[in-house]
Amino acid sequence: MGSNRRLSADPLGQKQREPISNTNLLLTITICTFFGMYGMAMAVWGSGFLNPQQFLDLFNNNAFLIVVSCGLTIVMIAGGIDISVGGITALVTMACVVYLDDHSGSVVGSMALALGIGTAFGLVQGFLISYLEIQPFIISLAGMFFAKGMTTIVSVAPRTAKHVAFLALKQFRIVIPGIGSYGKTGNFIPARVELGVVIALAVVLLVYAMLKWTRFGRNLYAVGGNNQSALMLGINVKRTRFFSYLISGVLSGIGGYVYLLHTGAGNASNASAAEMQAIASAIIGGTLLTGGVGNVIGTLFGVLSLKTISNIVIASGLREPYWQSITVGLMLCFFILLQSVILSIREKGGMRKN
Amino acid sequence: MPNDIALSMRNISKSFPGVRALHNVDFTLYKGEIHALMGENGAGKSTLIKVLTGVHPKDAGEILIAGSNKEANIKSPQDAQNLGISTVYQEITLCPNLTVAENMFIGRGDYHFVNWREMGKKTVEILEKLNIPARSTQQLATCSLAVQQMVAIARAMDMECKVLILDEPTSSLDEREVEKLFSLMRELKARGVGIIFITHFLEQVYEVCDRITVLRNGELIGAYDIKDLPRVQLISKMMGKELDDISEIKNSRVSHARADIPPVFEATGLSSAAGTKAFDFKIDQGEVNGFTGLLGSGRSESVRAIFGADKVTGGKIHINGKPAKISKPKDAMKLGIGYLPEDRKQDGIVDDLSVRENIILALQVMRGFFHPFSRAEAEKFADEYIKLLGIKTASMDTPIKSLSGGNQQKAILARWLLTKPQYLILDEPTRGIDVGTKVEIQKLVLKLAEEGVSVTFISSEIEEMLRTCSRLIVMRDRNIVGELMQDDMTQAKIMRTIAGEAVQNG
Amino acid sequence: MKSQLVIPLFALLLLVVFNLIRDAGFFSLSITVNNNGNSVLSGNIISILNSASELAIISIGMTLVTASSKGQDISVGAVAAIAGSVFVRVLREHNITWPIIILAFLGGCVAAILCGVFNGTLVAGFKIQPMIATLILLTAGRPIAYWINGGATPTVDSPLLGYIGSFIPGVPIPTPILIVIVFAVLVALILRFTNLGLYTQAVGINEKSARLNGINAAGMKILSFMILGVCVSIAGCISVSRIGLINHETILLDIEMDAILAVAIGGNALSGGKFSIAGSVIGAYIIQALTITLYAMKVSSTAVKAYKAIVIIAIVVLGSPVVQGYLLKLRDKLFQKSKKALESQAYGE
């Protein structure tokens, strides 16, 4: 990543600062926005925001969204889109519950099932999009329909997991010593983090590493940036695209499992708006839908920002649910315009330099 | 193969349906030389390069590359690259969203994990060796276009290419950037790389090249050392006219231009965002004037500025003596100006629409959104012009994309004739059209002039211009370098003006 | 008949045949007496045509937007909620008479057109991809609809609305179907008496060339979004009138997906250019027919989605350039084989 700020000399002997890359610029804006928002919230509304548990709950409640958004980030970097992630998540929750409760499955088995479902979707969608060259929007739309439909076929009614071993896993908490809040009776309740958060953060780190240090990861950027050039540079564009969708599918499977760990229930309406929230998170985090630019750290902060905005809206007294979505919409609008403006300035500057 | 030859192409032939693009063409490139490949449109330059880089398979002939006695079998761009042939196109072939270092190394080699430090170090070495002003960690998009091209060349060089093809690398560069590019090219030359330089800029060819190969109409005209080929001879070979041979085809037509009334169109200081420098221009009623010069000399950009096709950045305009403002094509159309674009595929035809729809399009727009032509009216118009220009089409409802290039051109011409303009701009109207129709079009232009229509005619064929125009504006390298009238309008004079040599006696 | 209508008509035919095989009486019509004492037509055909009304109207607008902007508008459901909310709000604040209903409808139209201008400006002015630009209203639209009525799910009580949403007394055909017919005729007239079709297609096929012919490309794009706004508003008002209330969360939920599908099934390229409104409308009815067929087969409403998905995939896979190219090669090979067979017959014996 490193934006190298050493001065460089150009042929005329003028000193220039090397400009910060697009990716880093957008990332910086996102991170600043998040901390700015949270800081302001702490200052203005105190109470809840000063409670470390509330901060951690941002992660606890949205771990699945983090995982799924990472998958979407990967796909968007390569220039594609995947709106099936919410549907796959719902299907995985339902299928795993039914497997655990009705078929006395094992916890490990349920994890394998989740991965299997995600992989299957990823394989089929990836093939249809990159090798048959069909528009990703339509294919992933069909994928979403299919997943949501299958969820009710697996079980018409919502189901709550009763599997003992699984519930144990669900209840598992990591306690963070030293920080916490005081309960009503004056007891110190240490802050807790759910298992899903650990998985989510692990995914973020793994994806980050992949994007930065593996050949495949860099190929994603090349393909998204200019797929004609990528082809000429010797990259197998079709294969790269295929794998981006495959990974997104797998991550949707993992995300579904994380969702189940959090709610313990399978329901067709789970994660119903997840795909749009994931896309919004990625965009806020600095990933361009046109491809070639993006990073998962930004997406992580995008998710956090998205959810913090909702909390701020509630705290400021606008309790009706519609205010949250309206503010999210405004935020999205701001970031989309910002991206568009920055890019066009950059492009003009680059072309006419010197 | 002799040791000092980098590339040898022999007897290359290639045909497309209906067109013989290359016929028995030879091309030899020595190691450590910069070799210009020149020819006007349809000469076969791009086909030759595409055959060499594996975009099109050749029909006949053989290609030999240094270091191997076997004939090279090039079936794809990857093959070409593996054999040591690298190409840098006018459009960027790298990924602007990646850093310089990444662009240098991506897609090469067998690695699985990226070692940023190693990559950065190697890149810095390469950049310093070749004196390229960029940082290895810089995002490519923030480098100027010239530097981007240099990085592309550096990559090719690092891949140890034997042949480097530079396809129009200087079109978007300013003078300083061109100099940097040239010094890089000379550096490569010193290392024994053979460079094929394709460009329209005459001066640049003479500045940096060692040899020139000229193609015309798909055939090899010859390969020459630069010092043996003065500019004027180069022009004459490219255009197919021998200097001594010309029977001094003078312009003998009677001019119908009306000098007594204000000019139909007059512009001072007209400049556009497409890079035309400010120029003055006027044309009288009934006058036919021409813009000539090599392809790429700025003719199209100038007339596009007149029509408002590119963003106009300065200048004053008068139509029939009255001040007017043209900021977009519709303004020009309302003032009675029509424009047949040079690139009919990109700017002319609307390929999925029918021939009829394409023909009536401009007139329809002038009529207005709420006044569509009835089917009968539209058919009448289309029919009239299909007959008049002899457009060969299965029916007027056939999508225009299935017509041959020449017939498409006729349809676009019909479109503008239909608007009955007072000033018609034709940019290469006869390109890709059969000889018989070329003559028809020239006659049509003369008839229009007789009827009082002013015409600006751009063509690379000097005879056409001589037969129709009464005044010729000569351009070279984006500048107007001369204006010829009456007695001055001889083939020899024109070519000398294009070439820029001192004007001798006529 | 345009060749692009072949596949959609064929698909429709398949559906019809399938249903007839499964249940010969599927398409029977009968006259029944409805709640208001009117005798009306009923039957599966009527159900299909009736319930597809909103989709058909929106598909018309979506076709134009796809054709000119080379992308899709995913905010139509949300904007329908906004238009419907304005409609309800105006109605609730006045005595409901026909002039008021018209006023309310116009109010909804204005709201929807403004949304269209917003989307259109982002696309044409800021050069943002349509799907991203419309993501904003998709997120904020339904909440805005909720806010217009101060929350809750307001109801509107008036027999006049029944005229719009169900039947006009004395007319046996449900009114929404009639509205679709009237609107379709209106659109056809507009296409006939203006250059909307020609300009939109020119902009979608080759924007550069369109500009050089004097067409205002940005204007055409914004216009197509505005027309979609009108379509959306009509659909929203019909939807409200059916049940006499507006639920901002569920009104026309996911209709954007169905509309995009209808456009694609209708043979229109999702990447813009030439279009056929008739194709999209047929596509809309195919989607609805498929849904009703599945209901008749006792498939639950949520499971229907899975079947829809399979049909979609089948259609787009068949239409994909790779598969088309493959099929052409196959056809040529078979053609060669039969030619050779004929030739060898001629020479052989």
Image: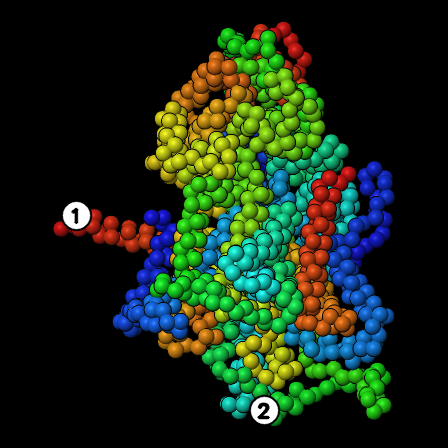
Mark drawn on residue C346: 1
Q: How far apart are labels 2 and 1 at the CA level? A: 76 Å
- Say what secondary structure mark 1 lies in: helix
At which x and y percent is residue B222?
Answer: 54, 25
At which x and y percent is residue A272?
Answer: 58, 72
- Say what secondary structure mark 2 lies in: loop
Q: Residue at x 40, y 36 (%)?
A: B374
Badge count: 2
Which residue in the structure is indicated by mark 2? Answer: A162
Q: Would you call the spot at circle 1 few (<14 residues within 10 Å), some (14-19), or many (20 or more)?
A: few
At which x and y percent is residue B452?
Answer: 51, 15
Seen in the picture, residue C50 relative to A96 is either above or below; the reply is above
- Determine the chain carrying the residue at label 2: A
Mark drawn on residue C134: none
Q: Would you call the spot at circle 2 few (<14 residues within 10 Å), some (14-19), or many (20 or more)?
A: some
Seen in the picture, residue B116 relative to A324 is either above or below; the reply is above
Q: Residue at x 44, y 19 (%)?
A: B444
Q: Are marks 2 and 1 on the same chain?
A: no
Q: Is residue A72 left or right of residue B178?
A: left
In this orientation, does residue B18 appear? Answer: no
Q: Residue at x 68, y 88 (%)?
A: A171
